[in-house]
Amino acid sequence: MSGKIPFDSYVLRFVTIELKNSLVGGVIQNVSQPIPNELIVTVRNHGTNFNLLISCDATFARTHLTVTRKKNPLVPQAFCMICRKYLDGRRISHVQQRGFDRILDIKCTDVEGNCVTLTAELMGKHSNLILVNENHNILDAMKHVTSKVSRHRETLPGKKYVSPPVDTTKLDPWSVSSVSIEELGKEIGSEPESSQALIMARFQGMSPFLTREILSRTESASLSQIWQTLFSTNANRQSRAVIVRGEENEYVGAYPFPPAQFPASSCHTRANINIALDHYYGNVIPMHALDSARHELTVHVDRALKSHLKQRESLDRSLQEAGRAEDYRNCGNLLL
């Protein structure tokens, strides 16, 4: 099986469940922004400090608890300062995934009952982290989006917060009836691509990986049984988070369940999905940075080498021309 396991809506669902247990009722102790696209919120709850990482990186957008400590810049980012102003000392009153989308809302309340919401939109290159007050006005955002970029969703301080568009014709897979699943089972054919497109068109939040996971399980169980396993309260209770490695022992991803697309020997169990994600990204991101630096260096060396080869060819031609100088002088004298 090729490709990486994404941080999709299904992963966020299980992260959210664990964050509710860990963070709700806790008090925000600190906010830091070690790198431009990453915020860490430290919450004191149950006698323990929890570090919530929220990343808006185009490649590694995600949120999970982390034990990794990162050095902060000497001068805090502007967004970090705004978050400290509005979040420090507030109590987390609510943590909720919005529908079955890659959006997480964290509501924070002060002693007077005033509420602000930290909204993480974890959507690849469109990811953003937005601080919104109770009147739905944007206090600030990690990435400012002007009207030149999006006429419908400006993300600037003072603007009204507008949710990303939602396809209301799609069903929520967590609340769909068994009758609908049975009907879907009759529609699914033998062609994987058409079956995958059908599921993604019918339900919210279905990533290509999740739809492939559903279809890979149809070989050993009915669609109704698969739905009961993946999209029920029992799934929440019986989740068994894993880190998945490939054939060459490379990291492939983390998921709430051992994916049927991979052999059991590739799946390594962790205590919960937050630990699995922290372990996975803690290893993959440095490797990705190293690969990117290696690629950039290789491109730079190749470009410099080609430039020097061209200069050498030019010098060789000049030397060849210089070697015929006496011939040219004789020809000139004959012409004169």
Image (cartoon, helix red, strand yellow):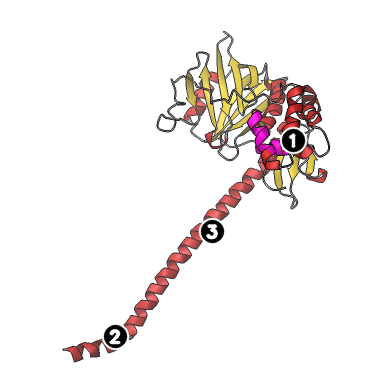
Q: As shown in the figure, which amino acid type bears the numbered disc 2? A: Ala
- Label whose residue precedes the other's in the sequence (1 or 3): 1
Q: Position of residue 208 (x, y in %)?
A: 66, 38
Cα separation, mark 2 vs mark 3, equals 41 Å
Residue extent of the magenta highlight: 195-213
Marks 2/3 in contact by CB < 8 Å: the verdict is no
- Label whose residue precedes the other's in the sequence (1 or 2): 1
Cα separation, mark 1 vs mark 2, equals 78 Å
Screen quadrant of the C terminus = bottom left
- What's the residue at 71%, 46% (across, down)? 251
- What's the residue at 49%, 23% (across, down)? 82
Q: Which mark is residue 325?
A: 2
Which corner quadrant of the image does residue 231 belong to? top right
Few, some or many C-alpha atoms within 10 Å of disc 1 (few <14, some 14-19, many ≥20)?
some
Q: Which residue is mark 3?
A: 298
Which corner quadrant of the image does residue 55 belong to? top right
Element on which disc 1 rests:
helix
Camera-side residue of 38 and 295: 295
Q: In the visual, does 30 lie left or right of 331? A: right
Few, some or many C-alpha atoms within 10 Å of disc 3 (few <14, some 14-19, many ≥20)?
few
